[in-house]
Image (spheres, rainbow, N blue to C red):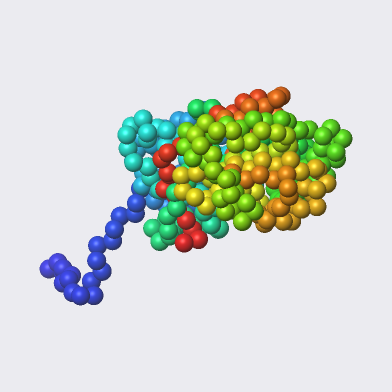
């Protein structure tokens, strides 16, 4: 005769089904190895895992993920991959009029600026604790009415990034140099070892004119306190600049706190103008890395939008990826925040 279990106070309750989860990884990323693939499959057996090798594949996958109503979407493989994935999924959901999923950023890139902002650590641990961590919105900045990213810049940073990419490609020939350029040491070689001598000789600089957008803007002191206010459409800055950066997240990668006031005020981004001589910048590199850079030719602003005009084209980067040159930028904060997992909460 069949035996049926009697439900008692000790009988386990019905287990809640695992939330629908997608994992989108850049198959070309150096840290997305076969071992990583196996470990992702082991720790997240119920997730749908996608590996993309081109922008065309990424476009197909992000559209499919957006159309299929996942509760959680994890992505990893460098800041460029992370930013592109989140942006493309959200654009499609905007078209459909649907809510955003919760995004998890895995630390599987080289710089990991966005991952560091959300306190990401071991990707295996982070993949299994989505429902047990806090939440924090990611705000993207829109450039020229198109591309959206949490940080970008012009001038020296893009110049150094171009050198870093060049040296990293050359380093692929040998295992020891490949490993070197996956670390902060490689970035320092590109910056201090190659770029600074070029800065001293070539002295790249631009005259820029920055006009405030359609909301009140602020100038900040070194502590982040407001010392000046700008009306909509007012002139914010006019003069020389060797570098400018925008961000809603403080890190440029390797926990370099380039924009320490990026998440200070909701609804605004940090815009920093730097006009330091090359040797002065090197002398203050440790302070700059910790977000404590101090110099008379350093200017910090909080804005919701602005227009930047250059006297001649400047190198430009978005989310850590070199994007050619620009002689004008139209910048605004995208109004809709994106819910992300905060692994440090």
Residue 163, percent from left and from top: 76, 37
Q: Is residue 253 visible?
A: no
Farthest residue toward the right?
Answer: 201
Q: Quadrant of residue 10?
A: bottom left
Farthest residue toward the bottom?
Answer: 9
Image position of 207 (left or right of 133): right
**Number of dots carrying numbers:** 0
Residue 122, percent from left and from top: 55, 58
Which of 209 and 229 lies nearest the eye of the viewer? 229
Q: Quadrant of residue 132?
A: bottom left
Q: Is residue 337 visible?
A: yes
Which of 88 and 147 lies nearest the eye of the viewer? 147
Name the residue at 77% across, 47% down. 281
Residue 160, percent from left and from top: 74, 39
Which of 87 and 215 lies nearest the eye of the viewer? 215
Name the residue at 69% across, 45% down. 298
Which of 275 and 124 lies nearest the eye of the viewer? 275
Name the residue at 32% across, 34% down. 97
Residue 145, percent from left and from top: 50, 27
Q: From what the image shows, is residue 39 above or below residue 337?
A: below
Q: Quadrant of residue 150?
A: top right
The N terminus - image quarter: bottom left
Name the residue at 48% across, 30% down. 59
């Amino acid at each position: 005769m069949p035996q049926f279990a009697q439900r008692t106070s000790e009988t386990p309750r019905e287990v809640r089904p695992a939330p629908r989860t997608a994992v989108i990884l850049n198959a070309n990323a150096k840290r997305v190895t076969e071992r990583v693939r196996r470990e992702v499959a082991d720790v997240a057996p119920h997730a749908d895992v996608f590996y993309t090798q081109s922008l065309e594949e990424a476009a197909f996958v992000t559209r499919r993920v957006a159309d299929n109503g996942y509760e959680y979407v994890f992505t990893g493989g460098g800041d460029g991959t992370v930013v592109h994935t989140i942006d493309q999924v959200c654009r499609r959901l905007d078209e459909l009029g649907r809510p955003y999923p919760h995004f998890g950023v895995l630390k599987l890139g080289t710089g990991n600026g966005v991952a560091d902002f959300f306190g990401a650590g071991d990707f295996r641990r982070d993949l299994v604790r989505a429902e047990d961590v806090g939440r924090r919105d990611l705000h993207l900045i829109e450039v020229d009415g198109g591309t959206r990213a949490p940080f970008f810049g012009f001038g020296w940073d893009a110049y150094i990034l171009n050198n870093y990419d060049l040296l990293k490609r050359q380093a692929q020939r040998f295992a020891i140099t490949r490993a070197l350029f996956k670390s902060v040491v490689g970035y320092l070689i590109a910056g201090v070892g190659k770029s600074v001598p070029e800065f001293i000789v070539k002295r790249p600089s631009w005259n820029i004119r920055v006009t405030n957008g359609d909301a009140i803007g602020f100038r900040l002191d070194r502590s982040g306190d407001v010392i000046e206010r700008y009306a909509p459409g007012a002139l914010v800055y006019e003069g020389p600049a060797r570098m400018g950066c925008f961000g809603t997240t403080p890190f440029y990668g390797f926990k370099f706190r380039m924009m320490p006031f990026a998440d200070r005020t909701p609804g605004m981004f940090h815009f920093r103008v730097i006009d330091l001589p090359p040797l002065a910048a090197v002398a203050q590199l440790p302070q700059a890395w910790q977000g404590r850079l101090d110099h008379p030719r350093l200017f910090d602003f909080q804005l919701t939008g602005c227009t930047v005009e250059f006297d001649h084209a400047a190198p430009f980067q978005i989310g850590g990826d070199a994007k050619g040159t620009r002689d004008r930028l139209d910048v605004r904060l995208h109004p809709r925040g994106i819910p992300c997992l905060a692994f440090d909460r």
